[in-house]
Amino acid sequence: FFFSSWFCVILFCSDFDGTNHPGGGGPEAARDIDEKKTRQSTTRSLPLLFTFFERNRALIRPKMFAHKTTTTSSSSGAFTPHVQKGVAAVRRVLEKKTSRSPRVKPHRSMTITNMATTPPANSAVSDIRVEKSEVKPGCVVELSVVVPMDVLAISYENAIDEATAQANIPGFEAPKKKDGSRKKKDTKKPPMNMLLNAVGKDQFLLLCIEDALTSTMPQAMQFVAKEAIQDSETITTTPRQMVEAFGGPECTPSKEMEYTVKMCIQPTVQWTKDIDNLEATYVSPGNDETDKRDTETMFQNRLRDMATMRVVEDRGLEQGDVAVIDINAMDTSGNSLPGIETKGFRLDTEETDLKLPGLMEEIVGIKVGEEKDFNLTFPEDWSIKSVAGKTAMFTVKVNELFSREMPELSDDIADDIFAGSKTVEEAKAQILEAQKMSREVEEAMLKDQALLDALAAACSCEIPESMLKEQSENMFGEHLTEMQMEGKMSMKAIQSLASEENMNKFVEERKDEIELICKRTIACETLFTEKNMVITQGELSDELKRQVKDFEAQGIEYEEDRMIQNARGAVEAAKTMQWLKDNVKLTELPPLERPA
């Protein structure tokens, strides 16, 4: 977490369910929380202990094989990249131009992500000129493409046919077929001035560019067919620059069209260690002794969850209370620190670990409706370097305040402590069993992580720019989603964090972790290839069926090609992990000492 985006989570590290917090919701805050409802909701929460580790197991593992080198080719052997999305991006950018706003806006690169399935129909594309650049930092390569006039002339004619079909000008429609559709090739061509007035000049230019890109991109991409990373291609030339090639009368071609395509190529990997003799260590997450202590902690937490919450009106906040607060902070110049302002934050002083020294002492005693300003200095070793050692002025307001009335401990509440238990001792035994199971899951996760880290440490390579970007965006999105699902921040606060500026700060704070995950991915892909691992049709089919079943059960739509790619990646990842388990010497270290 970084300071400007997850301030409250860092300071308090407490879960917050905005729909369940005591007193949340105006007049109803004055009523006590129904004790039975509270017990039922917390009884169902124990399985989350397992899903927590399973979720983090997935997060720790790299997004493996997401950047496989693309070797898909047409029947003629030509590399045929996806261009439809790139063309759609050109269309969207050009459509932004209006008569009221002729100024050219700063363009954004257009991602080309689809793969054509047939060779280009335009035979003249062999005349295009392509120049490949040297490899730049981030494994980046650029292709400078020059499209000659004769190719543009063909694209111009194709654009006329498409525009005519779209315009549907009376007297120039193609004859209808039996099914009601029309044959584009039989359409009569209207005068160009009439056609341009009907579809619009910008729309016609879009069609010209679309055809030119569709007919030339596959040929150009042959220059990097064996080394380009899938889905890393972007057109860096602005649409405004491309349409200049159609600057003649009635949008006819007036000069050659030039565009540049940037993509990343597969990195060169060098092993710094003998991968057949790797060693790894991991710290055990616990043992029977720690399980007993953790079980007692979970038991006490469960009792607190079952407590009846009583509205407090005659005193200020005390240790053990639950409060709903608003919080904000400013620097010494009086400027609000971005991303900090949070309203309706649920602060449980019993469960919360207040990370910032002095914070608890400052908020104790604040009554409902009161607001307090105070200064605190962040420690020099604070995890967020941008504020480490600096002083900030905090403003905290208490909106609602509750105390706990603990339940009487008896066998009558055993089922509420752990579903199905008849006695308190049986409930404790069930919690202990659940704790042991969760520790086993965590230990498996730590083992996998240690194996991957050992392999990544032996891998020396440059990380492709596109891989870093994709991983950064994925991790940032995952964190925002988790924040929302766990209820730690309101939807409005989450939306305010979803900005490019906050993502850049997040990436800077998590740079080492992002690079490590990318390096794990590269190392695993290389290992899979070098060890000649293969995937059988049966293995791929079984994994594909499993994934399709999961998606359909959740009512999620999916693309067949993408699903096959994901299934292949999952099988490759599983085979690579199994090789590491079979060949890397793994040593267990004793668990870390915990405070009593």
Image (cartoon, rainbow, N blue to C red):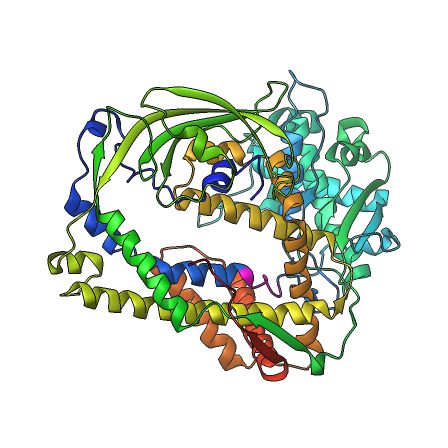
- Quadrant where the N terminus is found in the figure: top right
Q: Which of 453 and 430 is in front in this view?
A: 430
The picture places residue 298, in percent across and down from the top left corner, at 32, 57
Which image quadrant for residue 499?
A: top right
Question: In the figure, is residue 38 to the left or right of 329?
Answer: left
Residue lying at 59% horizontally and 35% vertically, measured from the top left: 378
The picture places residue 288, in percent across and down from the top left corner, at 39, 73
Q: Nearer the viewer, residue 227 or 190?
A: 227
User: Can you say whether 154 is above or below 66 in the image?
Assistant: above
Magenta run includes residue 92: no
Residue 318 seen: yes
Q: Give the range drawn in magenta.
A: 60-65
Instruction: Name, please, the residue furthest toward the top.
Output: 100
User: Can you say whether 547 is above or below 326 in the image?
Assistant: below
Residue 568 seen: no
Please tell me whether the stretch drawn in magenta is mainly helix, strand or loop: loop
Q: Which of 586 and 466 is in front in this view?
A: 586
Residue lying at 45% horizontally and 69% vertically, measured from the top left: 286
Magenta run includes residue 64: yes
Question: In the figure, is residue 401 to the left or right of 212?
Answer: left
- Quadrant where the C terminus is found in the figure: bottom left
The picture places residue 270, in percent across and down from the top left corner, at 80, 70
